[in-house]
Image (cartoon, grey):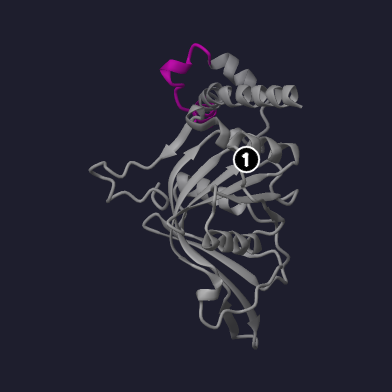
Amino acid sequence: MLRRQARLRREYLYRKNQEEQSRVISERKRKIKEALDENKQIPTELQKDALSLKKALDFDDEGASDLNHIDDEYRWAGVEDPKIMLTTSRDPSSKLKQFVKELKLIFPNSQRLNRGNYEIGQLVNACRANEVTDLMIVHEHRGVPDGLQICHLPYGPTAFFNLSNVVMRHDIPNVGTMSEAYPHLIFNNFKSKLGERVQNILKYLFPVPKEESKRVMTFANDSDYISYRHHVYKKIDHKNIDLHEVGPRFEMKLYEIRSGTLEQGKAAEIEWVARPHMNTAKKRKHLSEG
């Protein structure tokens, strides 16, 4: 099993390392095709290889698109339902345990694991062996949940979020009953490439819902703070619906994405990291601006 995982990891890294070379070749082909279609002069830097690129163009499928390691990470998304493992930091408080129980109700097909003395490497290897697609670890500070790590398996990515304004279900007045149907998802204001990346990380934690599902989850981005809300609804008539919040609710703020998995630690490639101390940090909106 270990040798097989090492081999698959090497193959994945090799495909990932070939992406840049393939992207450069595709860009050169695109420029040649544009010049020929518009009857313009071929760019000077491409004239030497123009004939060979033109021959390669004849074998390209116009309907195909270049795949990358991100497509490879989520290639079975929507085909197979995700399988999620939820756990906490060591020695969790009663409030953190309650929060994880409520998270288990949010994510279909999820299981909760008591952390005990397990190391990160042991958790990740056990999840891989049992075909778990995502490992989620919740952290706290003085009894208040304040961190969430989402590790997609078997190769990554791993996203790190800060949590704030956490409100449990039992703290919401007149809370509705919890539906266990697969939820419909609403994502608002994820317009940049990073925003689309974060949207995919969150979206693929959920299976494909049925049309008749009356459960809705909203991830709304405002100034890089992602507000999570959970509702159920029922139709009153053809114009009106009755909407009930069923909780929990919280805000998430992304501070890092790594291309690898949790057990790799600092050895994993950093895909994106927040720089809050830069002069322009307050002006930039990473998730909503391109």
Which residue is labeled 1 in the image? 118
Q: Position of residue 20 (x, y in %)?
A: 52, 24
In front here: 173 or 60? 173
Going 69% across and 55% down the picture, which residue do you hit? 110
Q: Position of residue 208 (x, y in %)?
A: 70, 58
Relative vertical location of residue 131 with respect to residue 182 in this rendering, above or below: above
Taking the image as drawn, is residue 258 in sight?
Answer: yes
Q: Position of residue 96 (x, y in %)?
A: 53, 59
Q: Position of residue 27 (x, y in %)?
A: 51, 27
Question: In the rendered structure, which amino acid carries the disc numbered 1?
Answer: Tyr
- Residue at the extreme top of the image, as rendered: 48
Q: Is residue 207 left or right of residue 195?
A: right
The crowding category of the residue bearing disc 1, from other C-alpha atoms within 10 Å (few below 14, some 14 to 19, many at least 20), is few
- Residue at the extreme bottom of the image, as rendered: 237
Relative vertical location of residue 247 with respect to residue 113 in this rendering, above or below: below
Which secondary structure lies at badge 1?
Answer: loop
Going 65% across and 73% down the picture, which residue do you hit? 178
Going 68% across and 23% down the picture, which residue do you hit? 6
Residue 68, by quadrant, is top right
- The stretch of residues the image draws in magenta is 30-49
